[in-house]
Amino acid sequence: MPAQIIDGKALAQQIRAEVSVRAGALAAAGRRPGLAVILVGDDPASAVYVRNKVKACADHGIHSVLEKYDAALGEAALLERIAALNADPSIHGILVQMPVPRHIDPHRVIEAIDARKDVDGFSVRSAGELMSGLPGLRPATPWGCMKMIESTGVPLRGRHAVVIGRSNTVGKPMALLLLQADATVTVCHSRTADLKRHVQSADIVVAAAGRRRTVTADMVRPGTIVIDVGTNHDEAGKLCGDVDFAAVREALGPAGWISPVPGGVGPMTITMLLVNTLQAAEAAR
């Protein structure tokens, strides 16, 4: 028998139902949660992501403001707009969709956002809070992955987790979240020697390498939890992840768990963005 599916859509719906209730309570108290989304340029993929985020807000009681700008927008003008949103009490979260045009420094943009409104969890302060184990706004994708792992009911304490990828947005914060859950963590990347050996020793695998078929059936043990963060396309142009899904699912056996692409991490990323916005609104004074 194949591994069990971790249904990101179903889990996201459960969490979003809770978001709706909490957002309604805040609105009744006169503090409706508000998210500002800024899109600079006309990247098609970014436009889709932004549209999905704005729709999710509307569906769950969060006020959203979408600001679209031409790719020629200057960095100074963007920073000025962020400063205005920082000062706006009706906005509790600010998200600048990445990537921004090449003439804009993404680090300066991220650091310009008030840390209390950094719902992407990308700022140096947010990263420091995560590393130190302090409360704060967590990066949405790795936090969503943690919720998916927790949904299996498998305890993380003492388990060996392998994270494939070391990006600031997924790999590194994912490793820190797993460490906080008392897992023993190995971070692998493009320079890792013998990736297969590391993955074969894992109880949990989070694949965030950005390359299809990074994880194949001969690399996993039965009973492993595999979370696929990848967003790629196969030879036919169909969306796929970093994991050879069908073959790995069979290799994991009935005691294993695996997330699909699509329908896995994607819905959870947007969901945890909503949760971050809600938490920021609840913390606002």
Image (cartoon, rainbow, N blue to C red):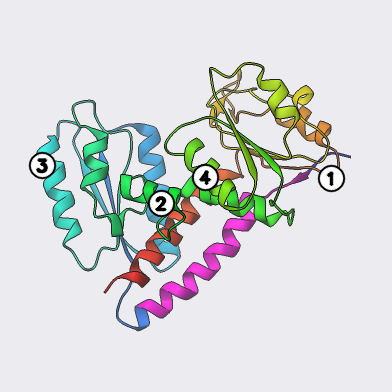
| SS of the residue under disc 4 | helix
Please state which amino acid type lies under the numbered disc 4: Leu
User: Dot 1 surroundings within 10 Å: few (below 14), some, or many (20 or more)?
Assistant: few
Counting residues from the N terminus, which is met first, the one under dot 4 or under dot 3?
Answer: 3
Q: Nearer the viewer, mark 1 or mark 3?
A: 1
| Residue assigned mark 1 | 255
| Foreground label between 1 and 4 | 4
Q: Disc 4 designates what residue?
A: 176
Residue 22 on the magenta span: yes
Residue underneath mark 3: 77
* 2 vs 4, front mark: 4
Label pair 4/3, CB-CB below 8 angstroms: no
Q: Is residue 156 above or below residue 74?
A: below
Disc 1, SS: loop
**Dividing the image into 4 quarters, which one contains the N terminus?**
top right
For badge 2, the amino acid type reads Lys
Q: Is residue 269 visible?
A: yes
Q: Amino acid at mark 3?
A: Ala
How far is mark 1 from mark 3, CA to CA?
A: 53 Å
The alpha-carbon separation of the residues under discs 4 and 3 comes to 35 Å
Q: CA distance from mark 1 to mark 4?
A: 26 Å
State the image coordinates of residue 234 (x, y, percent, origin top left): 60, 22
**Quadrant into which the C terminus falls:** bottom left
